[in-house]
Amino acid sequence: MFTSINPATGQSGQTFEPLDEEGVEAAIKRAAMAFRSWRVSPIDTRIELLHGIADRFEGDKQHLAETAVREMGKTLASAVAEVEKCAAGFRYYAEHGPAFLAPVEVATSSGRATAQWQPLGPILAIMPWNFPYWQVVRWLAPTILAGNVGLLKHASLTQGCAALIQQMVQAAGAPDGLFQNLPIKSDKVARIIGDKRVAAVTLTGSEGAGAQVAQAAGKALKKVVLELGGSDPFIVMPSADLDAAVKTAVKARVQNAGQSCICAKRMIVHTDVYDAFLDQFTRAMAAVKIGDPMVDGVELGPLSSVEQRDTVLEQLERAQADGATLIGGEKIERDGAWMTAGVLTGVDPDADFAQEEIFGPVAMVFRAEGIDAAIDLANNVPFGLGSSVWSQDQAEIERFVRDIDAGMIAVNQMLASTPEAPFGGVKRSGHGRELGPWGLHEFMNLKAVMLA
Ligand code: NDP
């Protein structure tokens, strides 16, 4: 049984019956059947369905958002914003997707050719709890538009959200088998990846899960997209608007209780403004409003689970044992998965914990003597997902854009995903891209058609 546990109270909520082997087999069969007709469905049918699902998300916004809050603890305001973003994601692919599917003319030495985008088949998505709707939608919307069909293995923590997504898609009139939520544990995943009726797999989550899924996909010679962790740098140079940088750094670090792959996790500050930044930042982190995530104005609720909170506390213990200084970042003694926001200084950048992703509301702050040192520090982790740089100097900005090892860089702003721009990383943050035309094309067959 899956049981939702409210991380704000520690109390159990809804339970969900897991799917057994026969259920998984039936789902794959249905997916394969659905693909036969969906792959040749008129584009207008797909567009209509995408708009229909967007309407459902908008219509049931409050219910969807409250379910996410109860299952993984994000603030209600951010959950509502997430649901609205999902609706926008479906509409983006409905409105812009058809143009991305247009055949491309190719001039060859022997005549004319075109390259045509065709669907691949049933795609398995393994998704995490941190943005329980948006992570799914940024795969599901292009899946539907492409003419593929979807199988979802959602995180154990957010089975209620997973069931609601299924309801929204069905209520919008999706054909049977087009999208199926599979309430299964991760030990069932390798068998699904290996099934010849499943065409490809995508995962958002930890490095460990990514490596296992990539291994199964490699064994079956299947395409895999991986969106894994990050330890994003947030670089502040002397010319930056310091007040804006501090305000954004706090927001970027505590959003989603610090549990976002593109949260700013390492603040790298030029020595000329280091003391001023640290002073303001530490005070602002201490002033973050902690409380019931359902209440308006609360900035930091509980973490997603007691296990997740304890993982972060254990990392902080190791940091202190290694000589780092921690301000805040303490367990709050009450039922649920609570802790305060915190700041770590005096961190050895090569220490084990400094090479890990801290998936909670605690920032490391580093001093950089100059731009070279800032870039070296930024790149001194195994990850390469996002980054944010703060400077008014065009030459510095160009250096950062050129030299930071990351899939994404935000200049004088917080990094956030948007339906139009590519999303993904390099190094151990994974490979492949989601969103925009790139996310749509990841799971399509670009067929070369040679014409006489
Ligand atoms: P996981 O990577 O374990 O979970 C993400 C998804 O993968 C879940 O659906 C999970 O299922 C599934 N999964 C886990 N192990 C396997 C496996 N061996 N084979 C197939 N599927 C698997 O993340 P956690 O929730 O445990 O969080 C741990 C850490 O992962 C965090 O501290 C953070 O560092 C990172 N993370 C990164 C995210 C990101 O957005 N990049 C999102 C979430 C986590 P189940 O829930 O049933 O285990």
Image (cartoon, helix red, strand yellow):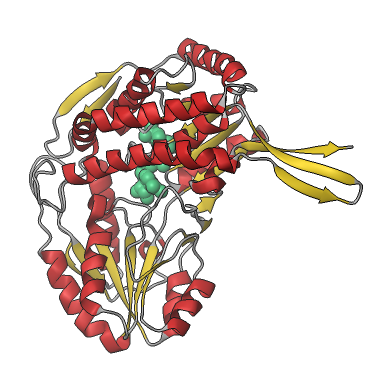
Q: Farthest residue to the right: give it.
A: 110
Along the viewing direction, whichever of 199 and 98 lies nearer the viewer = 98
Q: Quick check: can you spot residue 152?
A: no
Along the viewing direction, whichever of 352 and 376 lies nearer the viewer = 376
Ligand 1 quadrant assignment: top left
Residue 341 falls in image quadrant: bottom left
Q: Which quadrant is the C terminus positioned in? A: top right
Along the viewing direction, whichever of 301 and 444 lies nearer the viewer = 444
Q: Is residue 137 left or right of residue 199?
A: left
Q: Position of residue 185 (x, y in %)?
A: 41, 26
Seen at 52% across and 51% down, the residue is 430
Seen at 22% across and 40% down, the residue is 80
Q: Quick check: can you spot residue 423?
A: yes
Q: Is residue 448 left or right of residue 133?
A: right
Q: Position of residue 12 (x, y in %)?
A: 17, 27
- 85 lies above or below 313: above
Q: Position of residue 387 (x, y in %)?
A: 41, 65
Seen at 22% across and 35% down, the residue is 65
- 83 lies above or below 403: above
